[in-house]
Amino acid sequence: MKYIGGLSIVKPIEAQFLQYVKKMTGYREAIGLMYWDLRTGAPKKGVEQRSEVIGMLSEEVFRMSTSEEMAAFIAKLSPKAVYEELDDVTKKTLDECKKEYERNKKIPADEYKEFVVLCSKAESVWEEAKAAADFARFRPYLEQIIEFQRRFIRYWGYEGHPYNTLLDQYEPGMTVDLLDELFSRLRERIVPLVHAISAASNKPDVSFLFAPFPKEKQRAFLLELLKELGYDFGKGRLDETVHPFAIGLNPNDVRITTRYDERDFRTAVFGTIHECGHALYEQHISESLVGTPLASGASMGIHESQSLFFENMIGRHYAFWKRHYPRLLQYAPTQFADVSLDAFYRAINEAKPSLIRIEADELTYPLHIIIRYEIEKQLFAGELEAIDLPDVWNEKYEQYLGIRPHNDAVGVLQDVHWSGGSFGYFPSYALGYMYAAQFKQAMEKELDVAGLLEEGNIAPIREWLTVHIHQFGKMKKPLELVRDATGETLKADYLIQYLEEKYKALYRL
Amino acid sequence: MKYIGGLSIVKPIEAQFLQYVKKMTGYREAIGLMYWDLRTGAPKKGVEQRSEVIGMLSEEVFRMSTSEEMAAFIAKLSPKAVYEELDDVTKKTLDECKKEYERNKKIPADEYKEFVVLCSKAESVWEEAKAAADFARFRPYLEQIIEFQRRFIRYWGYEGHPYNTLLDQYEPGMTVDLLDELFSRLRERIVPLVHAISAASNKPDVSFLFAPFPKEKQRAFLLELLKELGYDFGKGRLDETVHPFAIGLNPNDVRITTRYDERDFRTAVFGTIHECGHALYEQHISESLVGTPLASGASMGIHESQSLFFENMIGRHYAFWKRHYPRLLQYAPTQFADVSLDAFYRAINEAKPSLIRIEADELTYPLHIIIRYEIEKQLFAGELEAIDLPDVWNEKYEQYLGIRPHNDAVGVLQDVHWSGGSFGYFPSYALGYMYAAQFKQAMEKELDVAGLLEEGNIAPIREWLTVHIHQFGKMKKPLELVRDATGETLKADYLIQYLEEKYKALYRL
């Protein structure tokens, strides 16, 4: 640390601030490892005590994020003359800490505690209600959660639409105005396409996808795939779990997990390519951000853009399977014996309206999200109440997807998010698709993606993503990343174009 | 928490103290998990950052153990009238915290820091010196470390011999007076036995021990063994590592690790039984001690007594292999095809003077320790200096074991302990043998150990250990445990008797 002239006051405080933040980041890393361990092989009987330890460290991180020390750092480093002297990484770190501090401080502590207790209760009630397909049982809890969120919105304040402040938690800078424009455009073009596909006679045969495929063989194939995709096993590892995830403990330790279904190899193969997309992002964040809150994805949606890009735009690409299908056959020589590459490609890209979001294909998936977005937005505009949700939900499914849930378990009760108070989160999933399509379009100006996939030369693709996206971590906001990487503001058109071209060809419409 | 009459002041402070200690224990658990992860499969490139996180949490635990809050708890809870009102667990917890506080506070912070820096330098110098078999290179560092330790002894104070305060760190209550008595008695009887065995013509054939034994087969055999020994996989797991260890994160999560040598199955088999002994101890500590520093072994030596009891007194017992040798043959059908149970039993119990402590058998091992003890004791009595060590070392090896190191790498430089400032630690290893033999003798008054081993009925043995040792964690001091469990003070006789009977029979002396 140097003490030079006029900076002699700023620099020591800046260093202390970074040290403080580094400790918080370190504690989060410890929490992350405990979380990973719990989900990959921790002994069952140790779970209770381990959860308490996670609680202790989480509480400490929360305390540090709202402490008087943090307030003092913010007060000392924020004045314009001081702020401008700060290193860029410190500036963005300070911005993050300030945002978190203000969000947390604006809610009275006892109200927040009440809310946390409510959510933990609500989640178990939601589970029961879902099992019984009985929305009425969950409704009183949902009503209270919505009430809390409406109050929090007032505490936080907002510009434009009240829902904007919820969006901002997951997708900084995103607004209702922009989403309305993007989603309505997407909906207008995708809904007719989905309806046309539903009516098409030319449907793929998918029966062979369910042929038995031993776990060990799947794993061996996956390891080969991951290496080719450039997942660095010196900075990560692959384990098994029930609900797969990727976790970046730090950019040099980014682990992925998967689940094997011996009756449907797609679970592990596409799930792992998806998690690999998340992991490649975090493995390529700049070393200079380690120890700060910036060493993670720019937003939920940008993170999802990377996993979806790999899962769908690479992993469901014809050229990719032109290379890998013969390899897959080596691990499963009998299962696909009579299946041509074309038939395989059509099967893994089957599109079909369905009721359950997490089982949806890439074409219909955004419609599931748009439905949730429209509902959430109306809830916080005061245009809807909890009691209205089942009917509105079912109407929208009928209208957009042409199918109607026969009960609330496969309708409005299907997702866990609302029971945990997560409103404003869903749009990120669909934004991930849009970002991915727009990145792909920009990438294709420079690279022959299909040609590279066929050669198995993923490095230039990965490098493009590192140069334009990965390295920055949270240094850029999502819309800034999109603009800098693609030269344009975010548009729905690239996703529409991608889906129309792909699915019209697949279904010969 | 109840507030009753006169306790209304004590109880809240007691509760706060326990809460404070629980947090320290929780942080230690997080550190433990990171340590385990680093040694079993953490990605290589993430190690540096993970080590920093371990450092942060360790620093925080150290800070808490010497903080003003801790000082206040000690001050408020220690006065006799208050102390006597405390719950037993709180009393012992307070004793532990007080001991740690005083040890840490008595050394000036800057001196301690200097010492830590010295040790970290000394360890790498020791590695080089050992590789070059050049004691002179290490000597200046060792001299300084000894000087620091002598000064620390003065800061800490001591009763009787200055070395007592070093012993007390690892074996609370142990003294030079007692060790002199125990070790000299042991030495007098073991040395002639070792010499007789060296001279015996009747030596076992061990060549078949080195037959190739595939790792997967070893692992399958181990899993079967561990289940029979009663290792609870609901509270633990078995992983691979370079230097095997057991680690109790809490009594419900006690993990063991092993290393496979495909050219010597003994590494994994006896190593795992050894770690299983440590693990069974921690898995059976009373639930009431969870969250306190008492939920661990009573001392280094008592811990070692459990691992050695399982490794040697069970795992090298004839009756044990009478049951398991036919099973081993199923996993290694060709390797031991022409080897009788008797020949196998003799081979795994080969005793032979050797230069390296960690490769020694159960008969000669205590002599390696006695040598180190005698040297350490003299160092801190001011009767020896670093410069004298190689000669003294070599003399003692010649005298006790009948062999003389041909260089310092296989002599005085072989162990890492002194380079890290760990003096007073070695005696615990030999005490472990004595405790184990005395426990065995007491156990055999109630149980037919050989009969149970032959039946594969380990439960009564394990229960005896739980009732008399395991459950108490650190609630009892080592010598108190021995007295309560065996009805006698600690004696060398039981170990002598065990070794004489076993080895005279084995070598037909």
Image (cartoon, coloured by chain):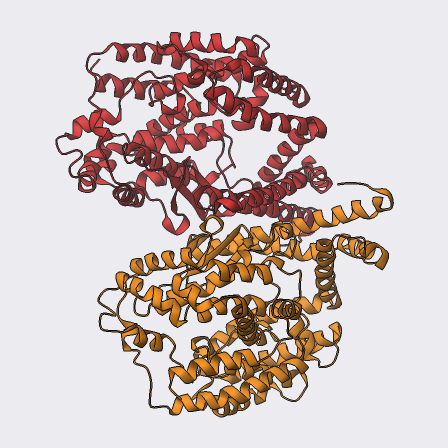
Chain colours: A orange, B red
Residue that lies at the very extreme toward the left in this rendered image: B338
The quarter of the picture where the N terminus of chain A appears is top right
Residue B454 x %, y %: 21, 36
Is residue A107 placed above or below A356 in the rendered structure? above
Position of B362 relative to B198 (above/below): below
Task: Judge left or right: residue B23 versus residue A360.
Answer: right
Say which residue appears at 82% left-offset and 48% top-offset. A10
Whole-percent x and y of residue A72? 80, 54
x, y (%) of residue B73?
A: 69, 41
Q: Is residue A73 left or right of residue A211?
A: right
Q: Is residue A55 visible?
A: yes
A131 or A364: nearer the eye?
A: A364
Q: Is residue A119 left or right of residue B77?
A: left
The answer to whether residue A454 is above or below residue A63 is below
In terms of image quadrants, where is residue A320? bottom left
Task: Tell which of A348 and B467 is nearer to you.
Answer: A348
